[in-house]
Image (cartoon, grey):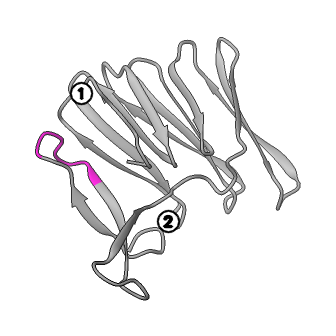
Amino acid sequence: MLFGLHLRSVRRPARWPGLAVLLVALGPGPFTGPARATLLDLSSPLPEVTATYDGSRVICRVYDPAQGREYTNTTAAPVIFAFQNRDGVVSWTSGSAVFVRTYDPHLTNWVEWNHPVPGVWEVRSHRGLVAWSATAQVGCTVYDRSRRTWVTDTAGVGTFDLRCVDGV
């Protein structure tokens, strides 16, 4: 059980071992025929995040209506590449690490994830999932809001064609 839902792990083809795709199986219920599956949306509950880069810092802001105030996260970043702000998750790379930020309204604070990845050149984000590609590694991370922790998976392979489609 993950994110309060029963999940089934389905493995990627052998060329990308280790990257799991999470599917939520919807029981037969009123449906006839085989059970249906849908992709899990792991976006932030407060997706209206603003993020800017001023040449030396990444500044993330979000307004939390339950608290009635804005929360800010500032990270020193002399150089950034592949900067993305999507679905309440901000991500970028410095070329030697992947950086991810999202706001957790239950903690009333920003949560950070910094991961050293030599040779990282591409970072993609969709529906809360952040994926990266490096010289000899692909990986992904997502913030598990029910456990207040980051869940990460990597594989020792590279790709030149990284895509995030429907959170995968």
Q: Residue furthest left?
A: 14
Label 2: which residue?
147
Which one is in front, 11 or 27? 27
Q: Give the residue type at disc 2.
A: Arg
The kind of secondary structure the magenta stretch mainly shows is loop
User: Over which residues does the magenta segment extend?
Assistant: 14-20
Badge 1 marks a residue whose secondary structure is loop
Badge 2 marks a residue whose secondary structure is loop
Q: Is residue 161 above or below residue 80?
A: below
Image position, residue 20 (x, y; %): 27, 54
Going by the image, does 89 lie left or right of 20? right
Which one is in front, 107 or 33? 33
- The residue that appears at 35% across and 72% down in the rendered structure is 36
Q: Is residue 89 above or below residue 159?
A: below
- Quarter where residue 55 is shown: top right
- Quarter where residue 37 is shown: bottom left
Going by the image, does 52 lie left or right of 123? right
Which one is in front, 112 or 49? 49
Going by the image, does 25 lie left or right of 47? left
- Quarter where residue 29 is shown: bottom left
Label 1 crowd bin: few (<14), some (14–19), many (20+), radius 10 Å:
some
Image position, residue 2 (x, y; %): 41, 69
Q: Is residue 38 above or below residue 18?
A: below
- The residue that appears at 65% across and 57% down in the rendered structure is 45
2 or 1: tag closer to the N-terminus: 2
On residue 159, which mark appears?
A: 1
Residue 160 is inside the magenta segment? no
Q: How many marks?
A: 2
Q: Are marks 2 and 1 in contact (CB under 8 Å)?
A: no
On residue 79, which mark appears?
A: none
